[in-house]
Amino acid sequence: MIKENSIGVFDSGVGGLTVLKEMVKLLGNEDYIYFGDNLHAPYGERSNSDIKSLSFKIADFLVLNKCKMLVIACNTIVASAFEDIKKRYNIPIIEVVSNGVKAAVSVTKNNNIAVMATPFTVSTDVYSRTIKSINANASVTEIPCKTLCAMIESVWGNSDEHYDALKEYVSEIPQNVDTLVLGCTHYPIVINDIKKCFDKNIVDPAYETAILSKEVLEQNNLLNSKGTKGNIIFYTSGDTEVFKFLGENILGFSLENIEHIKL
Ligand code: DGL
């Protein structure tokens, strides 16, 4: 594998941009290919076989485009297909769930953790299992947030309807919980609204994911050594204008290279 090759980052839609943002801050001279399958989002209400076959298509595309590492910036894909994706390719694969878990376990003071995630992710218990494998004393409440991803994909804005739905989900967090994991990469996009409803620790796995990505690139001698700013190409299976609007809000810089692609 060649150091100069891109890092592939992917999600069902724009949620993975919250991870890309942290990666660009830490690894600004790397080139990236981002893939958002906006046409088929939300994945969180799809079947396991659907999620697997869509994510294989995306990962195949990124590997065909010579990505040197893949970052699965989607909890739902991790819950469904991480083990299969790991077996399918011979390059480092990074994922968000274990990084969110690591952060939550180190931050909680009373071992009471809640996770907001998609219905699919919650149905797999991936967070409870992973948290308990590190801290057997932890108590984990997972809250399926059926409508949030679609609301965020269709532009969140200041709508009361969206905020009410969010409040309803947050109200399911038990009183004794001191740490909330955002177990869907779309949720950090509305973290300011989440903070209005929950005033204790909030974990966004993006930062830890970026740190681990850097470590893994170092270990594999794959860090790009060029001294100039990296390039990012965005692919979306959805509408490029909507992607550009949402993406620029999330990333805070203008997106130049957005291509529409059929999946
Ligand atoms: N952003 C994704 C996640 O982290 C997927 C949300 C969805 O498509 O339902 O789970």
Image (cartoon, rainbow, N blue to C red):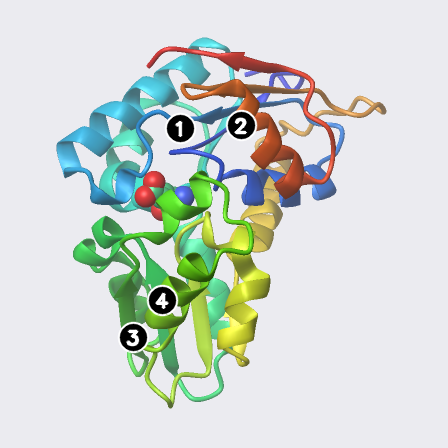
Q: Is residue 123 left or right of residue 195?
A: left
Quadrant in the picture for the C terminus: top left
N-term mark: 4 or 2: 4
Amino acid type of the residue tagged 4 in the rendering:
Val
At 37% across and 22% down in the image, what residue appears? 59
* Closer to the eye: label 3 or 4: 4
Amino acid type of the residue tagged 2 in the rendering:
Phe
Label 2 – label 3 distance at C-alpha:
34 Å
Whether the residues at callouts 3 and 4 have beta carbons within 8 Å, the answer is yes
Query: Horizontal and vertical percent for residue 202?
Result: 52, 70
Whether the residues at callouts 2 and 1 have beta carbons within 8 Å, the answer is yes
Quadrant in the picture for the N terminus: top right
Which element type, helix, strand or loop, lies under badge 1? loop
Disc on res. 243 = 2
Label 3 – label 4 distance at C-alpha:
7 Å
N-term mark: 1 or 3: 1
Label 4 Cα neighbours within 10 Å, binned few <14 / some 14-19 / many ≥20: many
Which element type, helix, strand or loop, lies under badge 3? strand
